[in-house]
Image (cartoon, coloured by chain):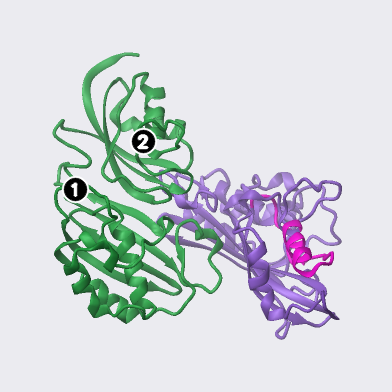
Chain colours: A green, B purple
Amino acid sequence: MVKEARRRVKIILSYDGTAYQGWQIQAGRPDLRTIQGTIEKGLTRLTGAPVRVIGASRTDAGVHARGQVAHFETESSIPTASFPAALNSVLPQDIRILAAEEVSSSFHAQYSALGKSYLYTIDRHQVPDVFRRHYALHVPYELNLAAMQRAADFFVGTHDFRSFCASGSSVKTFTRTVTHCQLVEQNSWLYLKISANGFLYNMVRIIIGTLLEVGRGKLAADAIPSIIAGRDRTLAGPTAPPHGLCLWQVEYHEGF
Amino acid sequence: MVKEARRRVKIILSYDGTAYQGWQIQAGRPDLRTIQGTIEKGLTRLTGAPVRVIGASRTDAGVHARGQVAHFETESSIPTASFPAALNSVLPQDIRILAAEEVSSSFHAQYSALGKSYLYTIDRHQVPDVFRRHYALHVPYELNLAAMQRAADFFVGTHDFRSFCASGSSVKTFTRTVTHCQLVEQNSWLYLKISANGFLYNMVRIIIGTLLEVGRGKLAADAIPSIIAGRDRTLAGPTAPPHGLCLWQVEYHEGF
């Protein structure tokens, strides 16, 4: 292969996470099918060289992405603008590269991210919609949506979100700033749109699990501030299933 | 099992046809996975008796349904209203029974149908939407939508649709009345909604294949009347792939 100067490429991609063990390659488990591993294999096949792909978000097994962002370095002669079509031709149909652009070597998909948005989808039909069964959590019981939105409002702002983080996480700080946390009702569909400067491990899924407890009347909306203040995972609700969750968008400084 | 008087039950169901060889059980091919066969197996498991299920439409392999209708007879003591939940508990997740009601023995899912509606979905994004890859045909090239709608209008009315019927079909008459044939554009999605008192084999898929030829400028919209008048399958466009097609609804006389 013709080699060019080493350059960094940013890609935007979407994937159906149903058939994957999450984004991240797991050390010593080459048998696990991961998004990262699948893309690295595709890039190696295209460029003839081993490639490391860094994602903005390490989505869990079964979680989807509409606008995941990742970067990699390459010396390949493939023009940057040709990477989406070239990669899509070697990737399985459930991963699609939407865009690619060259970025400076200071760009880092994870560390340069200013914020992320997730969408969680709930299917409230009595019988689940067969076409979205892998992309929505089926919740056929009554929900108090007004109470859920009141509870959701408490998450907005800068808080220590330790109560909404899977135990055992090792992070420097549990403080995150949630800029948007809104329920949107559309016929028998219910969406939670949530944006923050960053999310702790399982944070969105625990927030959803807690909001559903509020919706069912098992927890008062007004209990949220004390659950946040308690900084104890056992105070919050259960972790909602992964398949309703979708990484919607990752934001960067303009020009990145 | 407790036996009750024999009664006829009408069900409405939806299914993701991706994993099936169409609706219809094929004689001598018990190895083929069909919707009808899967439902009959589920009913037999529930009621302890062999059951024949008659569908309104024999959808092809890969074709989906949002509102297929079927009927069967049973002497089971399971209350009719309990059939959806009971059947859903034994059926795979890609088939869901939405409703069941007892009907008179003169009701026949296929012969009593007054009309059917289909939806064909086209994904016009440059890169296909990963979440609807099994439910939409990806058409990334330019389409002249005005010409396509002009062509679509010619299908409305009572015509001999032999040009839009897979060759080798044995039907009494090729005359059908199309009551609605409309393109709907929604961002990068294009839908064809088509209703008729009945459809010939592959009729919707051949109409779509022909409309796409018009959209690409390979065929003039004004050529449609002479293609219909020619009563010759070779005059029309190709048969569009099955996975964009969905049986939307089946209509009956009120009370049925």
**Amino acid type shown at disc 2:** Ile
Query: In the picture, which quadrant includes the C terminus of chain A?
Result: top left
Q: Residue at (37%, 72%) from the top-left corner?
A: A212
Residue picked out by circle 1: A171
Residue B250 visible in the shown view: no
Q: Chain of mark 1?
A: A
Q: Is residue B165 above or below residue B89?
A: above
**Amino acid type shown at disc 1:** Val
Please report the bounds of the magenta region as a residue range.
B37-62
The tag on residue A25 is 2
Count of numbered circles on the image: 2
Q: CA distance from mark 1 to mark 2?
A: 20 Å
Q: Quadrant of residue A122?
A: bottom left
- Residue B38 forms part of the magenta stretch: yes
Under tag 1, what secondary structure? loop
Q: In the drawing, does residue B188 fall left or right of residue B110?
A: left
Q: Nearer the viewer, residue A247 or B138?
A: A247
Query: 10 Å neighbourhood of mark 2: few (<14), some, or many (≥20)?
Result: some
| Residue B216 screen position, x and y as percent | 51, 45
Q: Quadrant of residue A38?
A: top left
| Residue A226 screen position, x and y as percent | 19, 73
Residue A46 visible in the shown view: yes
Q: Residue at (48%, 40%) from the top-left corner?
A: A93
Q: Residue at (61%, 47%) from the top-left corner?
A: B241
Q: Nearer the viewer, mark 1 or mark 2?
A: 1
Query: In the picture, which quadrant includes the N terminus of chain A?
Result: top left
Q: Do tags 1 and 2 sit on the same chain?
A: yes
